[in-house]
Amino acid sequence: MQKVSEKDGKYRGGDWGVKYMLRGPKLDWGVLLLKPGQQMGGHGHREVEETFYFVEGSGKIVVDGVAHAAEAGDAFRCEPPEIHDLLNDGDADCKIVFLKTPYLPDDKIDA
């Protein structure tokens, strides 16, 4: 058993971006925080599927060039090799939990 706390991790961008909670051995998962006007950056995976669950706020998920509105309580699963991006087009922070499986940390296709 392993316990982690969101308050203990650090966002890549200081006060926003990706914060990994657990990495491996079977999955990656963490939190993505986007401030108004920010976006994650489009990418895909060769083998990894990635699921996003919107916890707070609202925004859009763009999958293979098609934008989908998203709000707290919505979940989206992106399968390889779908190119996906997340953006906050609202006026409040948007917090998203992400899960990636299988654990292949180098499996990334930049858009």
Image: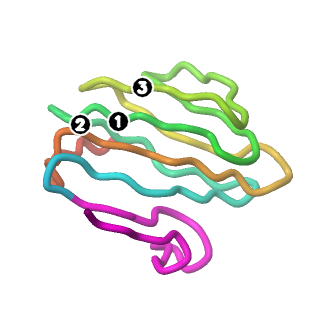
In the displayed image of the protein, which residue is found farthest to the front?
A: 1
- Image quadrant holding the C terminus, namely top left
Q: Amino acid at mark 3?
A: Arg
Q: Residue 77: which disc?
A: 3
In the rendered view, does 94 fall on the left or right side of 5?
A: right
Q: Which residue is painted at 16% across and 47% down in the image?
A: 26
User: Residue 22 sits in which quadrant?
Assistant: bottom left
Q: Is residue 79 magenta?
A: no
Label pair 2/3, CB-CB below 8 angstroms:
no
Circle 3 — which element?
strand
Question: Is residue 13 within the magenta segment?
Answer: yes
Which residue: 45% across, 66% down?
19
- Residue segment shown in magenta: 1-23
Tell me how far mark 2 sits from mark 1, CA to CA.
Answer: 9 Å
Q: Label 2 crowding class (10 Å Cα cut-off): few <14, some 14-19, many 20+?
A: many
First in residue order: circle 2 vs circle 3: 2
Look at the numbered discs 2 and 1 and tell me whether their residues touch, using CB distance below 8 Å. Answer: yes
Vertical comparison of 9 with 59: above or below: below
Residue 10, numbered label: none
Q: Quadrant of the N terminus?
A: bottom left
Coloring scheme of the render? Answer: rainbow
Q: CA distance from mark 2 to mark 3?
A: 12 Å
Residue linked to disc 1: 50
18 shown above or below 63 = below
Marks 2 and 1, the one that precedes in the sequence:
2
- Quadrant of the rendered image containing residue 99: top left
Q: Which of the numbered marks, if any, corresponds to residue 45?
A: 2
Query: Neighbour class for label 1 at 10 Å: few (<14), some, many (≥20)?
Result: many
Amino acid at the residue labelled 2: His
